[in-house]
Image: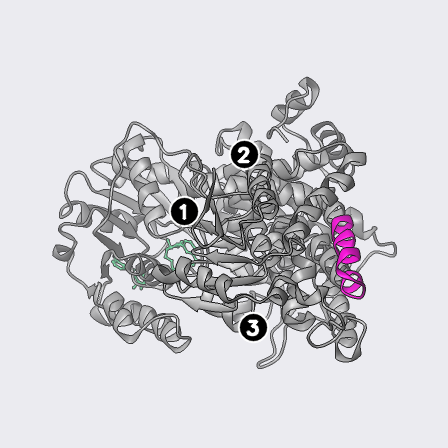
Amino acid sequence: MIDYEVDGDGIAVITWNMAKKPMNVLNEESIGAFFAAVEKAVADDAVKGVVVASAKKDFVAGADLDSIFAVTDPAALFPRHMEMQNRFRGIEKAGKPFVAAINGTALGGGLEIALACHHRIAADNPKAQIGLPEVTLGLLPGAGGTQRLPRMIGVQAALPLLLEGKRLSPKEAHGFGIVEKLVAPGDLLAEAKAWLKQAKPDDAVKPWDRKGFKIPGGKPTEGRNRDAFTAGNAMLRARTYGNYPAAVNIMSCVYEGCTIDIDGGLRVESRYFINCLQTAEAHNMVRFFHSMTKAKNLAARPKAVDPSTYTRVGILGAGMMGAGIAYATAMSGIEVVLLDTDQAHAEKGKAYSAGLLDKRVGRGKMSAAERDAVLDRITATTSYDALAGCEMVIEAVFEDRKIKADVTAKAEAVIGTAAIFASNTSTLPITGLAEASKRPESFIGLHFFSPVDKMPLVEIIMGKATSQTALARAMDYVKAIRKTPIVVNDSRGFYTSRVFGTYVNEGLALLAEGVAPALIENAGRMAGMPVGPLAVADEVSLELVSKIRKQTRADLGDAYRGHPGDAVVDRMVDELQRLGKKAGKGFYDYPEGDRKRLWPDLAQHFPPAATQPDVEEVKKRLMFVQSVETARCMEEEVVTDPRHADVGAVFGWGFSPSRGGTISQIQSVGLPAFVSECDRLAQAYGPRFTPPKLLRDMASSGESFYAA
Ligand code: NAI
C-alpha cells in the first residue's frame, strides 16, 4: 500500500497506493507502513530528500472513520495520540527536506501529512479538494492541522477554514498559501524532485523551528487577533447554542496552542481532539456520514435490476417545483422537456434556470458557453408529443387529483412502455394517483424539496403496485442528478412531512398550554433545528395547515384522533385571519424590509401561564416527538432502513445534524432510557409520546438500530 523507491540522485519517493481501497486513507495499517517508509528514508544516508506522492487519483482523502473510534480505553487515548503526533513531527525534524506532491484530493489527515512536509506542490486539478473538514464530523484536525495551518497562513486566515471545514480547489489553496506552488499535473513529480535538488539545509527546517519565528499576523493573544477570538467565540456560542462542541474546541485549541511553541501546541491539540472524540455529537455526525454515504451510493438499490442511464426527461408543470427539477436535471447533462398549459408558463419555468445559471457565471463557477449548453438542453413546450423518447416523466402540476390523473394519461399515451412516470405530489398517496395509470408498476413518487437546486434530498415513494425495476431506475435518476435518495412506502404525509409535522404540532400544543411563544421558538433553535416550530407553521402557511387538517378530519371521520394544537390553528385562521408568512401575518409579523418578529398580540390571544416550563423540557418535547413518530414509521414499515430515516430527517427538514437524525437520537440517548422518558412524557402531555411496541421490544431485548 506504500511504495518506496530511491532514484539515482538520492531522492526517495514514498507513494501512497492503497490498491484495495477506492481512495488512500489513513488507518492503523497505512499509517504504520507510511511511517516505516519515512523512517527508512530518514535513516538512509544515501537519501538526500523525500517526495511524498500518490499513485491513485486522490492524494490522501482523510482518515478511515472507523479507526478513529477504535481505541476505547480512555487511559490509552492520550499516549496513543501523542505517539502519532510525534511521528508527524518526525518528518519536520528529519534533517532532510520532504516535499508533498499533491496530485488530487488531500483532506483531513491527508492534508496534515502535506502540512508536516517542508514544502507543498499541487497539481492544478480543479476537481481536487484540499481542506480540513473534520469539524463537519464533530471532530477537529488532530494530526497537527490546528497548529500548523495557523502558523503557516496566520490565525485569521486559518480559523474560518478550520471552523467551516471548507474544501478548497488547489488554486484557492495556493491563494491561501497552503501550497507553495501549482503545476500542470504531468509535471508534478519532476517539479517536486527539482525543488528537493535545489533545497538548502535551511529548507529542511520548519519556519516554527527557526529562531525568532513569529506567526504571520501575530499570536492569538495579540492585537486584532485577540478581538477576533473574543467576537468569534461569542458569535459561535450564540449561533450554535452549544450543539457543536467541535467548533468551540477548535477555537480553544488554536488560541491556547498557538500561544506557545509547536510541541506544546501539539499536546494541546491532542487533548482537545480527545475531548471531541468523546462527545455524542462526534458519534452522531460520523454515524450520519456513513448513512449518507450509503444512501448516496444507492446501497438500497435492488441489485437484480440492470443500471439505467438517462438522456431525456419530461417535466409536467413548470411552476416552482417543475422549474427547479428541470434545472437540476439539465445541469446533469440530461435533455429536459418542460411542459405547461401555455407557452408563457413553460418559458417562465425555463427562465428560472437562466437566472440560476447567470448567477453561476457571475460567480466564476461556470463559463458563458457552459451556461448556454445547459439552457439549450431545456425545451419549453405545451405539446405532449415532445415527450416522445423520454425515459422518465415527472409531474409537478397543481396538487389536484383530477389534474394529475389527466396529465398522467396524456403523457402515458406518448412515452414508451418502459418509461417511468413519477409524481412530485407532497401529500396525495401514490397508490391512489397510480389508479390513473395504465402501468401502475412503473408509477412512483419522487418527492423533491424546495428550493430544488439547494436541497440534497429526494424522497422516493413506493406505491402498492410499484415494481422493483421502477424503484431501481428512479434511484439511478436521483443519483444522476447528484441528489441523495431515501426510499419509503406510501403513507399519509409519506415519511418526511409526517414526522416534520410533529415538530410543528408540538409547537402548537405548547402554545395551547400557555407556554410563552419566545420560549417555544428559542427551544426549537437551541435544540439545533434551523427555525422554531411557529415560524415553520407560518412558512408552510397556517391556511394550508388548517386546510390539510380539516381534510384529514373529514377523511378519517371518527378515527381522527385530534391534536391539542388544532384549536390554535383554527383560531389563527378562522378568527384572527392570521394566515401565515405569504399573507404577511401569522405567528410573526413580517414588516417589509425588516426582520420578522413575533406578533405582539399573540400573548393576548394565547396568554402565557404563570409558571413556565424549563427550556430543557421544551427542547425534549420538540425533539423526542419526532423520534417517536419516526419509530412509528419504522414499525409500520413506512421506512425500513434507519439510515434512510436519519438522512431524510437531516437533509429533508434540517433535523439537527449534531443529533445525527431522528433514529440516531434514540440510539444516542439509549433505547431503554428513551422509552422510559417517552413514557413519562406521554403521562404528562398525551399519547403522542407513547413509544410504539417496536421500541419497547427492542429496548427490552437489548437490540439497537445501529451497531454503535
Ligand atoms: P406551482 O403552482 O408553482 O406550479 C404548478 C405548475 O403546474 C404551474 O406552472 C401550472 O401552470 C402547471 N399546471 C397546472 N395544471 C397543468 C396541466 N394540466 N398541465 C401542465 N401544467 C399544469 O406549484 P408547485 O409548488 O411547483 O407544486 C407542484 C407540485 O409539487 C404539487 O403537487 C405540490 O404539492 C408538489 N410539491 C411542492 C412543494 C413545494 O414546496 N411547493 C414541495 C414538494 C412537492
The amino acid type found where label 2 is placed reads Pro
Residue 584, disc: 3
Mark 3 vs mark 1, CA separation in Å: 59 Å
Q: Is residue 295 left or right of residue 374?
A: right
Query: Which residue corresponds to mark 2?
Result: 642
Whether the magenta-drawn stretch holds residue 407 is answered as no
The amino acid type found where label 1 is placed reads Ala
Residue 55, disc: 1
- Give the tally of numbered discs: 3
Residue 699, horizontal then vertical, whole percent: 69, 23
Q: Is the residue marked 2 within 8 Å of ligand 1, measured from its CB?
A: no
Corner quadrant of residue 64 = top right
Q: Secondary structure at mark 2?
A: helix
Which is closer to the viewer, label 2 or label 3?
A: 2
Which is closer to the viewer, label 3 or label 1?
A: 1
Q: Nearer the viewer, residue 111 or 554?
A: 111
Residue 427, horizontal then vertical, whole percent: 43, 47
Q: State yes or no: discs 2 and 1 in contact (Cβ < 8 Å).
A: no
Mark 2 vs mark 3, CA separation in Å: 39 Å
Looking at the rendering, in which quadrant would you find the C terminus? Answer: top right
Residue 527, horizontal then vertical, whole percent: 70, 52
